[in-house]
Amino acid sequence: EPEVTQTPSHQVTQMGQEVILRCVPISNHLYFYWYRQILGQKVEFLVSFYNNEISEKSEIFDDQFSVERPDGSNFTLKIRSTKLEDSAMYFCASSEARNNSPLHFGNGTRLTVT
Amino acid sequence: AQKVTQAQTEISVVEKEDVTLDCVYETRDTTYYLFWYKQPPSGELVFLIRRNSFDEQNEISGRYSWNFQKSTSSFNFTITASQVVDSAVYFCALSGHGSARQLTFGSGTQLTVLP
């Protein structure tokens, strides 16, 4: 069964550094998403992306965050200057074009900011 | 604003017992979708079911069943004859018509099935 893949599985970075989290969505999916889960808390929506632009974003997704689809397969989340509170599990997801098709999540990248 | 409440933070059962995970939601949308996801100890989020607001028919898939009751804004999940491999965090989630691709998750229920 096709799946969403995320790399790396764990990233450690120092406060103030830039990080890029990478995702390869399911190939025939057209919508892409980033969610995050701070340890022990609920999963929170960050951003959705369609047709090479952001379609929705939450208030968490401020100017330090950006997303990009640099080629036909990868979807990336960049955090420009990481803060301690950015430490979380970041999930990429993708879905088909039809409305409310289920999101398929990757295994997540655990980001630790020290 | 949308909200999903999973009042049960943790549940422990012994293998082969039935267990029901509760989910109560709030939304102003008349069209909305409800989901359940499973997060095993390995951390990934696994899609289990999607339900739209017009379909209140209960669904059964193997040992899993879901009870959607619009009158009480609930979408409960029952595992019959639980197994150790069912141990995971289970999340209920909601998406509304106006923001169809943004899921609002509940805080999750940690289910532990003891052998």
Image (cartoon, rainbow, N blue to C red):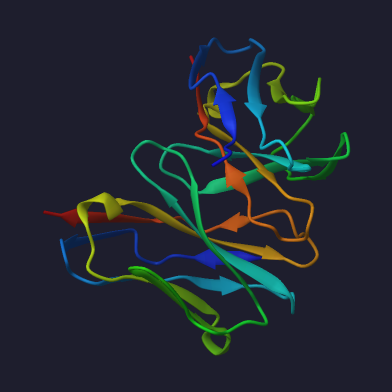
On screen, A68 above or below A92? above
Residue at screen point 58% across, 39% down: A2
Q: Is residue A81 left or right of residue B7?
A: right
Q: Is residue B9 above or below residue B88?
A: below
Front-most of A110 and A83? A110
- Residue A30 location, x and y as percent? 78, 43
Q: Quadrant of the N terminus of chain A?
A: top right
Where residue B53 sits: x, y (%)?
66, 78
Horizontal arrangement in the rendering, residue A74 relative to residue B42 (left or right): right
Q: Residue at x 37, y 36 (%)?
A: B42
Does residue A103 appear in this view? yes
Q: Quadrant of residue A60?
A: top right
Q: Nearer the viewer, residue A61 or B43?
A: B43
Residue B98, percent from left and from top: 80, 64
Q: Nearer the viewer, residue B83 or B100?
A: B83
- Residue drawn 71% across and 24% down? A76
The residue most toward the front is: A1
Image quadrant in which you'd find residue A83: top right
Q: Is residue A83 above or below residue A98?
A: above
Q: Residue at x 70, y 40 (%)?
A: A33
Percent coordinates x, y for residue B68 in the rendering: 51, 80
The image shows residue B93, relative to residue A35, as above or below, that is below
Of all residues, the one furthest to the left in this rendering is B115
* Left or right: B38 in relation to A99: left
Report whether residue B21 is seen: no
Number of marks in the rendered image: 0
